[in-house]
Amino acid sequence: MKDDKFALPIHWNDYEDIAMGLYEKFGDDFSESKIYRIRFTDLLEWVLSIPNFAGTREESNEGHLEQIQSAWVYEWRDNQ
């Protein structure tokens, strides 16, 4: 995702958009098994650093992070 001033903001429940941003950032650095082993503290920081991400740390929860991991795995699979 490019840092575009006209891009819509991304929120915690935009799992696919977040997954695409993470895949664009990390590419194939993480395989499926590695994605599922990422600490939620690291994942939280990476999500917060995605361009146009409008969510806050306080709005995050374990359910969001689990959904993001799953969506990231699907994004990774789609690009193999």
Image (cartoon, helix red, strand yellow):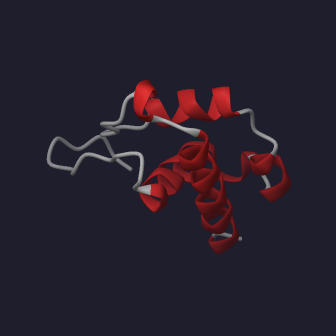
Residue 26, position in %: x, y?
Answer: 63, 44
Residue 60, position in %: x, y?
Answer: 48, 35
Residue 43, position in %: x, y?
Answer: 62, 35
Q: Is residue 50 left or right of residue 71?
A: left
Q: Residue at x 14, y 48 (%)?
A: 6
Query: Quadrant where the C terminus lies?
Result: bottom right
Q: Residue at x 74, y 45 (%)?
A: 29
How many marks overall? 0
Residue 70, position in %: x, y?
Answer: 65, 60
Q: Is residue 57 above or below residue 20?
A: above
Q: Is residue 30 left or right of residue 62?
A: right
Which residue is farthest right? Answer: 33
Q: Is residue 80 left or right of residue 78?
A: right
Q: Residue 79 or 8: which is nearer the viewer? A: 8
Q: Is residue 3 left or right of residue 58?
A: left
Q: Residue at x 48, y 49 (%)?
A: 21
Q: Residue 73 or 29: which is nearer the viewer? A: 73
Q: Residue at x 45, y 31 (%)?
A: 48
